[in-house]
Image (cartoon, rainbow, N blue to C red):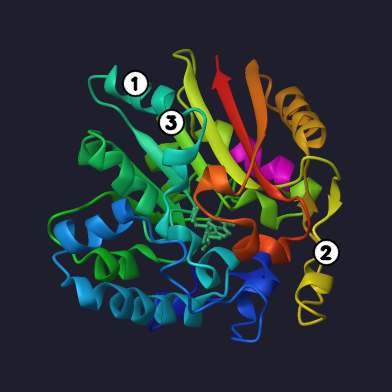
């Protein structure tokens, strides 16, 4: 990692998407509306776990989001989608929990861990903190402690790492390769073109423990119909001019995993599902900029 006074300022090159570096409030994936996505359950966490007075919850979330947005302008940040932990909405949620709870020393890795909202959700559902691991290009988890006001009470093993890095001696390889009962990654794979998606999924499989039915699961923006360019240039009204990511439907995501299976030489039992925005706690109006009839594509893979 290049040295920098603040890790947040480090140059992450092409490993994270150009559209997240635009940082403009005029992007169509920016809203001030927190209430439209903050469920009573999510609010309760801020009031009871984080001990924030009810009338301070919204301003606190907005001030914290400013820090996140000033670092990277992701759609999930601009639309406050991260307030709903996607792992709890995934079809394999109960399987993920029971798999982890069946182990004496479980390990789960969140790739693109961000503020670690999904790791907290796992913990609130009974997964011990000793199980929790996270990787991200940038240490967003520090802003996560400020968001949830739980530094000293909540911890996970965090490593700054790149999902496209296959270096055998890297910190992430030494700490996590072949050790994870569950590998989780949401809203990350969809930022890449096809060839990098193959690499990223191969990297997820590399983290998984082999021979014990480990799970690799995740979710991303996807369509029930079309597959192809994500059209982020058009959707950002010309503000993004870089290489387009590949947006999947069930058929193309299944084909992507078939390519990965051939390359990793490990048997993968793959299930891909399309779900609505409502299933994932958002609504079509909030997420409409992604284009008509989009939603969330899930994958659940058992690694044998
Ligand atoms: C859109 S956010 C999604 C965060 C979270 N997983 C969620 O579902 O809300 C993407 C996250 O992935 C991280 N990320 C992007 N590219 C990455 C890469 N090449 N390797 C590791 N993390 C990456 C970003 O820094 C960011 O925290």
Upstream in the sequence, badge 1 or badge 3?
A: 3
Vertical position of residue 1 compared to residue 26: above or below: above
**SS state under label 2:** loop
Hey, which quadrant is residue 65 in on the image?
Answer: bottom left
Residue tagged 3:
93
Within 10 angstroms of label 3, few (less than 14), some, or many (20 or more) residues?
some
Q: Is residue 29 left or right of residue 52?
A: right
Within 10 angstroms of label 2, few (less than 14), some, or many (20 or more) residues?
some
The reply to whether discs 1 and 3 touch (Cβ–Cβ < 8 Å) is no
Q: Which quadrant holds the C terminus?
A: top right
Vertical position of residue 260 compared to residue 53: above or below: above
169 or 193: nearer the eye? 193
- Residue 264 in percent (x, y) is at 68, 26
The reply to whether discs 3 and 2 touch (Cβ–Cβ < 8 Å) is no
- Residue 135 in percent (x, y) is at 44, 52
Residue tagged 1:
98
Upstream in the sequence, badge 2 or badge 1?
A: 1
131 or 30: nearer the eye? 30
Residue tagged 2:
231
Upstream in the sequence, badge 3 or badge 2?
A: 3
Vertical position of residue 154 compared to residue 31: above or below: above
- Residue 255 in percent (x, y) is at 81, 30
**SS state under label 3:** helix
Within 10 angstroms of label 1, few (less than 14), some, or many (20 or more) residues?
few
Q: Is residue 57 in view?
A: yes
Q: Which residues are magenta?
A: 197-203
Q: Label 3 to label 2, Cα distance in Å?
A: 30 Å
């Amino acid at each position: 990692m290049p040295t920098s006074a603040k890790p947040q300022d480090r140059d992450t090159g092409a490993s994270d998407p150009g559209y997240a570096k635009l940082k403009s409030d005029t992007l169509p994936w920016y809203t001030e509306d927190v209430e439209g996505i903050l469920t009573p359950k999510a609010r309760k966490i801020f009031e009871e776990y984080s001990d924030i007075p009810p009338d301070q919850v919204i301003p606190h979330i907005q001030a914290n989001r400013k820090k996140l947005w000033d670092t990277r302008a992701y759609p999930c940040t601009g639309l406050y989608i991260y307030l709903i932990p996607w792992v709890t909405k995934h079809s394999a949620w109960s399987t993920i929990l029971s798999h982890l709870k069946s182990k004496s020393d479980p390990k789960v890795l969140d790739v693109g861990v961000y503020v670690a909202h999904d790791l907290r959700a796992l913990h609130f559902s009974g997964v011990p903190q000793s199980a929790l691991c996270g990787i991200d290009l940038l240490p967003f988890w520090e802003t996560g402690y400020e968001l949830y006001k739980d530094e000293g009470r909540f911890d996970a093993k965090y490593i700054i790492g790149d999902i496209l890095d296959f270096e055998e001696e890297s910190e992430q390889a030494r700490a996590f390769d072949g050790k994870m009962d569950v590998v989780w990654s949401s809203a990350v794979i969809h930022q890449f073109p096809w060839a990098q998606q193959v690499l990223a999924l191969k990297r997820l499989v590399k983290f998984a423990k082999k021979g014990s039915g480990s799970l690799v699961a995740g979710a991303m923006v996807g369509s029930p119909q079309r597959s192809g360019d994500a059209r982020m240039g058009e959707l950002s009204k010309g503000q993004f001019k870089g290489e387009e990511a590949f947006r999947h439907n069930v058929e193309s995501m299944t084909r992507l995993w078939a390519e990965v299976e051939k390359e990793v030489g490990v048997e993968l039992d793959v299930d891909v599902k399309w779900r609505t925005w409502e299933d994932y706690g958002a609504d079509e109006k909030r997420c409409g900029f992604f284009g008509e009839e989009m939603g969330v594509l899930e994958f659940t893979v058992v690694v044998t």
